[in-house]
């Protein structure tokens, strides 16, 4: 084994997009790969304090978190390149569209297949970064990503994963097992 030092090497990290309202009511969306679930109804967002998104979440105490599909990878990447602090029409430039969430004070991007509507539950400080813990109040799914039982089908969802080693984007591979079942032979 070779020592690689201290690196944030967990893979895959899901590419998620945080949508918020700016102060003037326009939409901002940012790309976040360093986040995840931390309780059955909670999500953790690990953010740099200087992002417009960080300021927006503090102000409105709400956000939506979407999983983009591979078809929207360029828009997703752009949301991680540009900041609403520098580009006033950041969201409009992509041609995507949004509507107001019926439940939280945040936009829902129509083109993304799966969206968690969240309120701000808690703000934590982790070193120089900010961790927002959000409470999931509802999940919106486009019918096209559901199976015939109404569950989200990962293959239809076609999510994007971020590669922490070389900054690549990856699509889903093949299914290799079933949780709480595949390991059952050792029971
Ligand atoms: C693949 C990718 C993943 C990213 N993940 C994060 C992240 O987890 N946390 C973070 O603070 N910034 C992350 N960023 C950077 C922000 O998306 C970027 O700085 C963005 O411009 C912030 O936009 P805003 O200022 O409009 O909120 C990521 C960018 C990319 C391209």
Image (cartoon, rainbow, N blue to C red):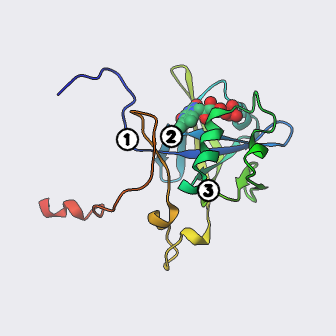
Mark closer to the observer (1, 2)? 1
Local packing at callout 1 (Cα closer than 10 Å; few below 14, some 14-19, many 20+) is few
Inter-mark Cα distance, 2 to 3: 15 Å
Quarter of the image where one finds residue 112: bottom right
Q: Name the residue under label 2.
A: 35
Q: Position of residue 180 (x, y in %)?
A: 28, 62
Q: Can I make out residue 105 in this image?
A: yes
* SS assignment at label 3: strand
Mark seen at residue 11: 1
Q: Can I make out residue 131 in this image?
A: no
Vertical comparison of 53 with 73: above or below: above
Vertical comparison of 18 with 153: above or below: above
| Mark 1 lies within 8 Å of ligand 1 (Cβ measured) | no
Inter-mark Cα distance, 1 to 3: 22 Å
Task: Please say if the residues under marks 1 and 2 sit with CB atoms less than 8 Å apart.
Answer: no
Q: Name the residue under label 3.
A: 115
| Mark 2 lies within 8 Å of ligand 1 (Cβ measured) | yes
């Amino acid at each position: 084994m070779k020592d690689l030092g201290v690196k944030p090497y967990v893979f895959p990290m899901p590419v998620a997009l945080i949508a918020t309202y700016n102060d003037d009511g326009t939409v901002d969306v940012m790309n976040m790969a360093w986040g995840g679930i931390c309780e059955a109804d909670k999500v953790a967002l690990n953010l740099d304090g200087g992002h417009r998104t960080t300021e927006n979440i503090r102000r409105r105490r709400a956000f939506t978190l979407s999983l983009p599909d591979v078809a929207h990878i360029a828009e997703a990447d752009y949301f991680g390149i540009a900041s609403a602090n520098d580009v006033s029409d950041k969201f409009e430039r992509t041609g995507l569209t949004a509507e107001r969430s019926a439940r939280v004070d945040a936009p829902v991007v129509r083109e993304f297949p799966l969206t968690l509507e969240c309120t701000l539950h808690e703000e934590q400080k982790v070193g120089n970064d900010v961790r927002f813990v959000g409470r999931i109040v509802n999940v919106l799914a486009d019918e096209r990503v559901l199976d015939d039982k109404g569950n989200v089908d990962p293959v239809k969802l076609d999510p994007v994963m971020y590669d922490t080693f070389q900054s690549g984007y990856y699509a889903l591979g093949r299914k290799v097992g079933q949780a709480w079942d595949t390991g059952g032979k050792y029971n």
